[in-house]
Image: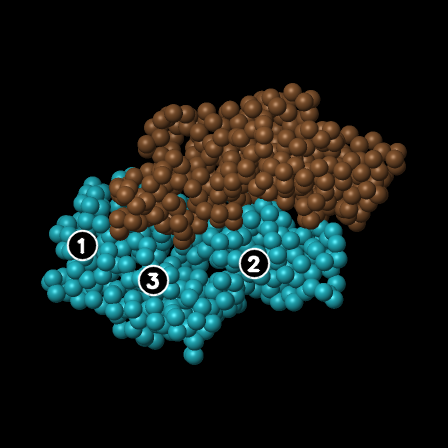
Chain colours: A brown, B cyan
Amino acid sequence: MQRAPASPGDPVASIETPALVLDLDAFERNVDAMAREVASRGLRLRPHAKAHKTPAIAQAQMAHGAVGVCCQKVDEAVAFVEAGIPDVLVTNEIVAPSKLLRLAALARQARIGVLVDDGRAIAPLAHAASTMGTTIDAYVEVDVGAGRCGVAPGEAAATLARLVAGERSLRFGGLHCYHGGAQHLRAPEERRGAIAAAASRAAESRDAVLRSGIECPIVTGAGTGTWEHEMASGVWNELQPGSYVFMDADYARNTPGDGERRFEHSLFVLAAVMSTPTRERAICDAGLKAFSFDSGLPVAWRRDDLVYRKASDEHGVLEVAAGASAPSLGERLLLVPGHCDPTVNLYDWIVAYRGDRVEHVWPVAARGALG
Amino acid sequence: MQRAPASPGDPVASIETPALVLDLDAFERNVDAMAREVASRGLRLRPHAKAHKTPAIAQAQMAHGAVGVCCQKVDEAVAFVEAGIPDVLVTNEIVAPSKLLRLAALARQARIGVLVDDGRAIAPLAHAASTMGTTIDAYVEVDVGAGRCGVAPGEAAATLARLVAGERSLRFGGLHCYHGGAQHLRAPEERRGAIAAAASRAAESRDAVLRSGIECPIVTGAGTGTWEHEMASGVWNELQPGSYVFMDADYARNTPGDGERRFEHSLFVLAAVMSTPTRERAICDAGLKAFSFDSGLPVAWRRDDLVYRKASDEHGVLEVAAGASAPSLGERLLLVPGHCDPTVNLYDWIVAYRGDRVEHVWPVAARGALG
């Protein structure tokens, strides 16, 4: 873990660059807005903590009524349970016996859920839980359109639900119906259409489970790009958005539909200019190790004069707009990451500021938690 | 820092996935081959440690005759000096006063170099060194074709060299002439041509420095894609390759020229299959947080039956070749990263194995060292 780039109370102007910084006012408005909207429909909110990996943020979400958080990895779950989060759903399949035992042990301290999409994975999960003397919620993952993990909709889901229900150390939690591919469809009608199709697959699967005589307490899913559609569908009763707390340049490229909420950019990389070799070009200190580039380049925040054009490991090449004056050596700028989740995973610390003052320096406790 | 995915002595079969793993036999052949070739020409080898960020690897390079290492960041230099590396060149411009002081303090324990490409940066650097009572080697960075940082070739380099020479707490180290853009040109004649042009710019700059009455002890640069051309040029006397210890999928796409050495793939991500939803598709546990995707997708190592097609945060979608049988649940595979440097930066540990046994588990001490 690296030294923190600032301390609480520092002026923002003294944060060492590059640093991952959070505008607390915008962040708090995002947390509050999502919590209110989901609560107003009487649904459960279980935000995805893979986006932030930060216990302090999970605690803020719990304080706003979240029922718990989602994670993708057992070691992320460990970090959140150790920080006192009482209910964690690992929205992923876990196969390795060592990880299953770690997960099962965690259920001594918190309510723990995990996904299954293969009958052969159920007995090993049940065995780990009974070995540790715990009970785990097992959710059946249904492929509702993403083409990633998950069983086919309908009877296959009911078959797995019955297998889960037959294990003494497992509880059937419900269905995990997440359409990752729909989150970044740009046009609102594309997102609406994708979630309408996902809703019918989820409903078909839920009905098959119910017909087989098993209760289906939860249908869980949704993300920042589509949550309003899942919320309105009448099928999902738990929503899992993650990126809404931060937003990023890629989510900002989605065109909002009528009445759809836009969350605010709250997360930035604070960078500094380290070289101004020509009038048209400035080089900043944030490159491939400061951002994830999987969903495009970072975007200079409220700077019409600068465009982030390319990156090498520790350099970002900024193009200075025609007619604009070049930035000065040491000049600082905020950059919006292309994709927030894997960008956060590069940093040991989030520097949370309000106005011109650092208020918190939060450890990204689950950074690098791959296991 | 996350828990290590293995311990020395463990069987490779028990390493928890995903893990960054190093084939020690291939790695040692790479380290040895580069050291021998550079030494046989009487040149200095200063490998770039931004590729590995790992003191144990720097020590192996020093044991093979390296004069020191390169870093890109002050906090990387801190990690290597703390680990006992006696000579570190930060191949980057440093502007912030707090970083300059940290760098200058480091020169109490090791020989420290850094780059300048702007006259206004020299007095602050000298001031930091005199404040700390140390002397720093300042190298003038020349833009020999990469279009990133650096002064124009020729007189501009000599002007900065004179400014450096006029500062009591600085030594003029020489010229930094690195052509990053040439490393990944695919055709050997393109790389040869780019370095021939860079060599004439570097020579022009060196000659301008010499004409102004200043010695130019070192001309340093080169990378894994082009080092043989810089070595043969007669202009460079110090080489900085980094990726050669590991290789990656992107470097493997360079076509080697006649007689050019190919280094061996030694670095892999060990992943496991966690879902086999259809006959054509398997999902592994290594995605956007296990690889950097800036230079393309990972490649399945010695597996004709599997192609890594796309990723989400913690999922990799593998396409099963027509006619091949699907991998089994939990099956493990090695994946070659697209780009080694930013992939290494995702991991807290490198698991170094020989045959089927883990020999070392090395901390990636400079991981996340952005400051």
Q: Is residue B212 left or right of residue A270?
A: left
Kind of residue at badge 3: His
Q: Is residue B40 above or below residue B275?
A: below
Q: Residue at label 1?
A: B160
| Mark 3–mark 2 distance (CA, rounded to whole Å) | 25 Å
Q: Is residue B282 left or right of residue B9?
A: right
SS label for mark 1: helix
Question: Which mark is drawn over residue B179?
Answer: 3
Locate residue A354: give its quadrant. Answer: top left
SS label for mark 2: loop
Q: Where in the figure is residue A142, as x and y percent of width and height?
A: 74, 42
Q: Nearer the viewer, residue A119 or A227?
A: A227
Kind of residue at badge 1: Leu
The residue at the point 20 percent across, 58 percent down is B157
Q: Is residue A90 left or right of residue B86?
A: right
Closer to the chain start, of discs 2 and 1, is 1
Q: Where in the figure is residue B71, as x and y percent of width and height?
A: 36, 54
Q: Residue at label 2?
A: B298
Chain letter of the residue carrying label 1 = B
| Mark 2–mark 1 distance (CA, rounded to whole Å) | 42 Å
The residue at the point 72 percent across, 40 percent down is A197
Marks 2 and 1 in Cβ contact (< 8 Å) = no
Locate residue B156: give its quadrant. Answer: bottom left
| Mark 3–mark 1 distance (CA, rounded to whole Å) | 20 Å
The residue at the point 24 percent across, 56 percent down is B151
Q: Nearer the viewer, residue A137 or A176?
A: A176
CA neighbours of label 2 inside 10 A, class few (<14), some (14 to 19), many (20+):
many
SS label for mark 3: loop
